[in-house]
Image: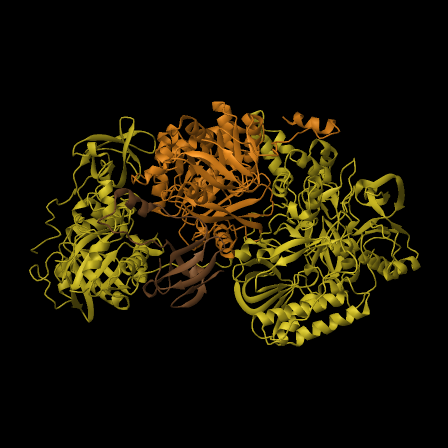
Chain colours: A brown, B yellow, C orange
């Protein structure tokens, strides 16, 4: 099966991972309008292409980010949220 | 008998006869024979019947590229006769006949073929509507090949894994060379071959060539001698998946292989010519004839015609002449008159040569089960048969050598792309991913020495990719001396029966007609005509169909395209894919104790939990009520080890909890607990449980058994994204938990602990570490079931001992273990919801009457902002209690049955118990807010359609003052 | 009746003309442009013409007719959904399907088989009962049955599921559950639309949508520009690319859904079997193949690649359910794309962009809705107002947090 590289554990089979969806910054609760909040909660980019997204390595409980092309399924890099700029 | 004298290179052992029966008749073959070769040697010509017209079929490719011979052995069905090695005692029958292969009663379908053109079933049978089910049933009966044997339940085979540096698929000249080249560079090589022996085309195409025979034995020896090469025969590479993950399938099992590089030396698939009756027994691919001759020592025919467009056809003619099998003629589709060595030899052998001719029609023999002659026509300037210039040749077989296409399935799946070569009239790989290499005829390389060289190149290229070869790669030539494949070996006939797809009985006119109807691109054509959709998945039919379509569209092959190749290369048994299956069950440390106590265990997600405990002859309902009553009256204990248990520690633990739960924790005193609910971002309840504060910066959370892992995972992400200094740890499996509940619970517990658990020292909602016997446990006073009770959380490996001591200690209080059903009842009496049972995927705190747990004025908590938006619109439902008429005799509603106000659906029952410790039925559920006041009379529709009256009731049913769980005195 | 087949044998030339024309060029202007030549787009065109007399319609399909979800699904048709809106909607589709072969005069092989949704736990049985109750209230034939009933109707099933995991507790039984020949539905609607003047343009990808003041005025294609005031997007797994052309944001994410098929077999399985917790569904086609699928691929991907893990897992569940299957061979596996919505209900109707209509959010539940989606989108386009049947499925429901929760009824997929 496909291999995904966990930043902590190295390359592991994809079945060891849980997909956490596209990465989204948390908007400022105090200033956001109702429409903007609903957009944040529900709407997604969805288009094929490069996406920064959350992944979780289940056996070790590690959350990390991946930059992946969602049409070719090529993972460009994986990294810990805390370590890098992720936007 | 068509068996030839034994020779060393044959695959059969003529000293080892094998007896089997086929279609009720006994035959004899030899060890190493496949069913098709053994039958052919015995003179049997009808080996199968086609799917639609039930035409007789014989050997065609003998390589698994056609599906003419499909048999059933009494236990398994859809077995391919070309691959089935015969064993003594086998009893085989052809599939999909009515009355056996010889006398198949459905063979008259062929007579009606003119009324059954392509897609005929779309045009008829649907009106009148009421008759279609009858027609569909009849169609199902004639469709389908083999029948499943219902009594046969084989054990599925175990799977295994393997690894290698280089996978080489195909052990022909190119594959063998690639394997040894890579192995010589120090790489671990896996070489797989779908046939029972290695050698590929060296085993049947080149046996008359002493250079080739020498090459074969040298290469096989090199493979055997190399410690780096593992050779697996009778193994197909069924599919190639992401990151070089390959499914290897043999008779016994599926192997999942991870390779670092792959060399595909899969060779070519010989393609048939299309002419009238090109499907009858005796018409076969030249390579099939060679396999028969050189592997199985069987003569393909007594007197064949060879239809060719390349040197290989002449090569075959000379081989037959050498074996004293008279060739009636060589019909060469080409017009060029530049004879090669091969051609000169055939003239020497006295074989008549017919250049610029085509076989136009094969004449059926007696009973249409063979052929007796062919009509050949000269090809005019447009390469169309000229019927006026024709000849009649007596023969009993047509051996077709008109061209090849790469065996491309794996190449495509691995990400390779193809382009059409006009020089070769075949597809060649044009773009390959970095770790994928193609060698040999699949790469368009035809000369034997060239194939070997190309194999070596590919093996070295793989080694270079993997860093163990640093020199330049040898070059290989790509242009052949002559074009090996004919551009259009396809000839129309007004009488049709010139087949393009043998599996589906699609003939040339079908494709023309489909095109006429507008199915003019390759995908639509395939789906409408079903070309390529049968068991051989288009190996010998897809390309001819593409050629025909290109011509009909006046387009090039490139413009026409081909259909996509999907796994599997050859069909794979479900049992191989299934393996032994591993289904994990999670058991608590008390699992054995429960079983010994006659618990009826139930699945709760992956966990097994006691539903209730059997005792004497009492019914399930009686026992559940008795367990619940024991808790109310005295004391009971339930194993709660499946609950989620999570530690949250750190300087920002409080901030964290206040942001992931709806409640407040800042002022929560150490040594106490709170009930808490958690929402998702849309405001929906996802979890509930307790939050115990063990220290300023240390909290201990509980979560539902089924949601724990997901909740923990979610908390981890929030911790990261909120940027808070907090550490989480999932102790669900590490800790066991019990709930000791009932008015006598303190008495029971007191015997086992020196800690002060009096009402003053250990009040309701206290949470502290205490020693129970020698074990340090977290003791929590909760009220889920509505009685004085203690949850005991302790390390799993000490749980059994403590549980047993508690049960022992509770004997004089008549302590009773209770299961999930009793717990459900007890909490229902208290009106406590169960997340996922009373709540669904959309339940909000306002609907579930837990708004008291929501501190709406916090600046941020997950789901909070959404609740603000949702609060702007009216509530649509509320969770309430329901009571039934005293003396209601039944029937009783079941959970999820609907509540009605007249004819309007206004809610549903989420929890119900007919019996309770209160002596009456209790229920909970949703109802519209305007109908939610106590006393409102509504109806529930039960299973038989009748209505039961219910009255809305306040919750809880039991002990509304909550005095029992807060019991301050004994 | 089969006597229709006589004309094939008694005429020397094949007597059928083109099912649908292939117009040589793209017109300058159309009343409605439909993006997507799958079942939904073709059905919408058909009903625009038939129900509303609108014939000046162009369908733009970037590949070949029905090449997307329509040609890849496992063709199960049913209406036993959980929500009132959903059940009503799909029931209307079932009713259209029942008469569709006659109406389009093309055999769609619509065959009632009976549909079981197996429950392996009390919780799952509860959900099935909830569905049954809602269905019954709407007059849909759907009820909960016990294991004995299942065994009687499906004798080859192992109620203990191989003994490894939770056994079958019961099922939701829906007698009208059916299968059909999915490609034929596209072809028949295509012919029906084409005969009424609709132009079907294959191999014509849309590259942009022209707006003026938040209103549609035209469509850019690979073959030129078209003027129009009304555009329907009916492209399922490709929706995000189209909606981005008009600056519209949706909740849709695209995941592959895989399926596989065995070699053809004599009649063996008469019912459609779905297991909610084992995430498997299987039926037997008229051709005799067992057609099976499982749950949605776990991560976003716009590629129709197959995985071995899918085949292994599905095979494992099939063998657990049907112990006589291990020797039966899988012929082929494939995949399609699913545009998943958060509540497993479609996203249909009008949008804030005037003249831009959306038929999307079809996830793993789109094929069965082919006729009704076409019909309701046609009426929506004409009235410029959502058809009553689809009012609750509008894109705006997410802004209002008014989800239509079908997660318990879309058989597999999450």
Q: Is residue C113 above or below residue B481?
A: above
Residue furthest out toward the front: C212
Looking at this view, is B635 or C275 the one in front? Answer: C275
* In this rendering, position of residue B757 left or right of residue B455: left
* In this rendering, position of residue B401 left or right of residue B694: right
Q: Position of residue B228 (x, y in %)?
A: 61, 75
Count of numbered tags: 0
Instruction: Answer with the quarter of the image where residue B235 lies.
Output: bottom right
* In this rendering, position of residue C406 left or right of residue B489: left
Q: Quadrant of the N terminus of chain C?
A: top right
Instruction: Answer with the quarter of the image where residue B481 lies.
Output: bottom right
Q: Position of residue C37 (x, y in %)?
A: 53, 37
Looking at this view, is B322 or B752 the one in front? Answer: B322
Whether residue B921 can be seen here: no
Q: Position of residue B526 (x, y in %)?
A: 63, 42
Q: Position of residue B749 (x, y in %)?
A: 15, 62
Looking at this view, is B451 or B775 the one in front? Answer: B451
């Amino acid at each position: 099966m496909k291999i995904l590289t966990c930043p902590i554990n190295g390359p592991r089979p994809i079945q060891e991972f849980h997909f956490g969806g596209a990465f989204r910054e948390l908007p400022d609760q105090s200033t956001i309008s109702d429409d903007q909040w609903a957009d944040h909660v529900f709407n997604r980019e969805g288009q094929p292409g490069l996406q920064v997204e959350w992944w979780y390595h289940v056996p070790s409980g590690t959350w990390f980010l991946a930059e992946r092309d969602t049409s070719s399924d090529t993972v460009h890099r994986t990294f810990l949220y805390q370590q890098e700029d992720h936007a | 008998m068509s068996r030839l004298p034994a020779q060393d290179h044959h695959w059969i052992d003529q000293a080892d006869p094998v007896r089997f029966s086929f279609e009720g008749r006994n035959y004899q073959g030899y060890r190493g024979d496949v069913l098709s070769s053994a039958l052919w040697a015995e003179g049997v010509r009808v080996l199968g019947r086609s799917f639609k017209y039930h035409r007789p079929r014989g050997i065609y490719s003998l390589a698994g590229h056609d599906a003419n011979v499909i048999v059933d052995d009494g236990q398994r069905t859809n077995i391919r006769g070309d691959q089935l090695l015969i064993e003594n005692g086998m009893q085989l029958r052809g599939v999909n006949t009515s009355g056996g292969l010889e006398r198949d009663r459905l063979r008259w379908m062929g007579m009606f073929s003119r009324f059954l053109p392509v897609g005929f079933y779309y045009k008829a049978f649907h009106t009148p509507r009421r008759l279609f089910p009858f027609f569909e049933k009849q169609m199902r009966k004639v469709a389908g090949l083999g029948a499943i044997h219902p009594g046969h339940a084989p054990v599925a085979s175990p799977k295994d894994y393997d690894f290698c540096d280089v996978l080489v698929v195909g052990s022909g000249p190119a594959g063998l060379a690639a394997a040894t080249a890579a192995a010589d560079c120090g790489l671990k090589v896996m070489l797989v071959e779908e046939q029972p022996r290695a050698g590929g085309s060296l085993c049947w195409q080149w046996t008359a060539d002493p250079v080739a025979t020498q090459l074969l034995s040298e290469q096989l020896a090199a493979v055997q001698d190399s410690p780096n090469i593992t050779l697996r025969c009778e193994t197909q590479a069924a599919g190639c998946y992401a990151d070089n993950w390959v499914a290897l399938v043999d008779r016994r099992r599926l192997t999942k292989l991870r390779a670092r590089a792959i060399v595909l030396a899969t060779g070519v698939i010989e393609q048939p010519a299309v002419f009238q009756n090109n499907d009858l027994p005796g018409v076969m691919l030249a390579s099939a004839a060679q396999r028969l001759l050189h592997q199985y020592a069987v003569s393909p025919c007594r007197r064949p015609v060879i239809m060719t467009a390349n040197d290989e056809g002449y090569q075959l003619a000379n081989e037959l002449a050498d074996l004293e099998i008279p060739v009636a003629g060589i019909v060469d589709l080409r017009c060029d008159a530049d004879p090669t060595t091969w051609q000169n030899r055939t003239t020497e052998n006295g074989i008549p040569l017919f250049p610029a001719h085509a076989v136009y029609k094969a004449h059926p023999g007696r009973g249409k089960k063979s052929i007796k002659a062919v009509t050949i026509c000269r090809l005019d300037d447009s390469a169309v048969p000229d019927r006026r210039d024709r000849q009649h040749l007596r023969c009993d077989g047509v051996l077709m050598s008109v061209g090849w296409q790469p065996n491309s399935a794996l190449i495509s799946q691995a990400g390779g792309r193809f382009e059409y070569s006009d020089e070769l009239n075949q597809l060649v790989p044009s773009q390959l991913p970095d770790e994928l290499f193609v060698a040999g005829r699949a790469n368009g390389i035809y000369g034997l020495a060239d194939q070997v060289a190309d194999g070596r190149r590919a093996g070295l290229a793989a080694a270079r990719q993997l860093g163990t070869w640093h020199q330049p790669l040898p070059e290989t030539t790509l242009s052949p001396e002559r074009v090996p494949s004919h551009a259009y070996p396809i000839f129309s006939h007004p009488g049709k029966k010139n087949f393009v797809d043998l599996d589906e009985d699609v003939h040339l006119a079908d494709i023309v007609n489909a095109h006429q109807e507008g199915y003019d691109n390759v995908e639509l054509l395939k789906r409408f005509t079903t070309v390529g959709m049968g068991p051989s998945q288009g190996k010998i039919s897809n390309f001819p169909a593409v050629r025909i379509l290109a011509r009909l569209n006046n387009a090039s092959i490139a413009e026409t395209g081909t259909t996509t190749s999907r796994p599997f290369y050859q069909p794979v048994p479900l049992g191989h894919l299934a393996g032994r299956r591993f289904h994990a069950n999670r058991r608590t440390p008390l699992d054995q104790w429960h079983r010994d106590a006659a618990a009826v265990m139930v699945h709760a997600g992956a966990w097994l939990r006691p539903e209730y405990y059997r005792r004497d002859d009492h019914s399930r309902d009686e026992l559940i009520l008795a367990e619940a009553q024991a808790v109310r009256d005295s004391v009971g204990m339930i194993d709660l080890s499946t609950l989620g248990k999570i530690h949250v520690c750190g300087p920002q633990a409080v901030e964290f909890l206040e942001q992931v739960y709806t409640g407040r924790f800042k002022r929560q005193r150490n040594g106490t607990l709170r009930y808490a609910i958690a929402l998702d971002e849309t405001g929906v309840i996802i979890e509930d449980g307790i939050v115990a504060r063990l220290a300023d910066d240390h909290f201990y959370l509980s979560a539902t058994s089924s949601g724990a892992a997901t909740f923990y995972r979610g908390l981890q992400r929030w911790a990261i994204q909120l940027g808070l200094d907090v550490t989480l740890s999932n102790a669900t499996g590490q800790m066991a938990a019990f709930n000791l509940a009932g008015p006598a619970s303190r008495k029971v517990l007191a015997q086992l602990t020196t800690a002060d658990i009096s009402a003053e020292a250990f009040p309701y909602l206290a949470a502290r570490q205490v020693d129970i016997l020698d074990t340090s446990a977290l003791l929590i006073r909760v009220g889920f079931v509505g009685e004085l009770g203690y949850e005991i959380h302790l390390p799993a490996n000490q749980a059994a001992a403590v549980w047993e001591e508690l049960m022992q200690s509770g004997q004089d209080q008549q302590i009773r273990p209770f299961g999930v059903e009793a717990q459900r009842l007890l909490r229902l009496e208290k009106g406590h919801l169960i997340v996922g049972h009373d709540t669904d995927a959309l339940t909000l705190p306002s609907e579930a009457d837990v708004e008291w747990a929501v501190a709406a004025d916090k600046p941020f908590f997950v789901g909070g902002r959404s609740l603000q938006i949702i609060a702007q619109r009216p509530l649509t439902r509320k969770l309430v209690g329901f009571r039934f008429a005293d003396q209601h005799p039944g029937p009783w509603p079941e959970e999820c049955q609907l509540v009605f106000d007249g004819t309007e659906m206004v809610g549903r029952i989420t929890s119900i118990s007919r019996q309770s410790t209160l002596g009456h039925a209790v229920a909970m559920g949703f109802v519209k807010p305007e109908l939610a006041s106590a006393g409102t009379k509504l109806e529930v529709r039960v299973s038989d359609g009748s209505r039961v009256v219910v009255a809305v009731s306040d919750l809880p049913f039991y002990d509304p003052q909550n005095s029992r769980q807060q019991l301050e005195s004994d | 009746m089969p006597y229709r087949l006589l004309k094939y044998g008694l005429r020397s030339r094949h007597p059928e003309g083109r099912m649908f024309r292939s117009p040589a060029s793209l017109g300058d202007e159309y009343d409605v442009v439909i993006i997507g030549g799958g079942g939904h787009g073709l059905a919408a065109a058909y009903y625009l013409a038939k129900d509303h007399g609108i014939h000046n319609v162009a369908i733009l399909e970037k590949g070949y007719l029905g090449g997307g979800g329509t040609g890849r699904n496992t063709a199960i048709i049913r209406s036993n959904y959980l929500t009132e809106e959903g059940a009503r909607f799909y029931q209307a589709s079932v009713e259209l399907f029942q008469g569709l072969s006659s109406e389009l005069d093309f055999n769609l092989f619509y065959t009632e088989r009976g549909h079981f949704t197996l429950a392996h736990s009390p919780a799952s049985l509860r959900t099935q009962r909830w569905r049954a109750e809602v269905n019954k209230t709407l007059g849909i034939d759907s009820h909960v049955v016990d294991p004995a009933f299942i065994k009687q109707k499906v004798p080859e099933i192992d109620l203990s599921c191989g003994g490894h995991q939770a056994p079958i507790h019961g099922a939701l039984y829906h007698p009208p559950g059916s299968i059909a020949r999915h490609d034929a539905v596209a072809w028949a609607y295509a012919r029906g639309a084409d005969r009424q003047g609709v132009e079907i343009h294959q191999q014509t990808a849309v590259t942009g949508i022209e707006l003026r003041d938040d209103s549609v005025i035209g469509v850019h294609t690979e073959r030129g520009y078209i003027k129009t005031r009304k555009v329907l997007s009916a492209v399922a797994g490709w929706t995000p690319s189209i909606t981005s052309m008009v600056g519209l944001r949706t909740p849709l994410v695209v995941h592959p859904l895989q399926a596989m098929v065995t070699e053809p077999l004599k009649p063996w399985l008469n019912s459609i079997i779905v297991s909610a917790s084992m995430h498997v569904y299987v039926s037997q086609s008229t051709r005799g193949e067992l057609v099976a699928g499982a749950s949605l691929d776990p991560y976003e991907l716009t590629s129709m690649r197959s995985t071995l893990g899918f085949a292994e897992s599905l095979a494992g569940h099939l063998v657990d359910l049907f112990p006589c299957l291990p020797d039966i061979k899988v012929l082929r596996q494939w995949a399609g794309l699913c545009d998943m919505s958060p509540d497993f209900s479609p996203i249909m109707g009008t949008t804030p962009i005037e003249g831009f209509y959306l038929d999307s959010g079809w996830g793993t539940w789109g094929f069965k809705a082919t006729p009704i989606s076409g019909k309701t989108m046609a009426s929506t386009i004409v009235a410029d107002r959502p058809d009553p049947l689809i009012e609750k499925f509008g894109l705006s429901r997410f802004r209002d947090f008014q989800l239509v929760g079908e997660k318990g009824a879309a058989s597999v997929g999450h």
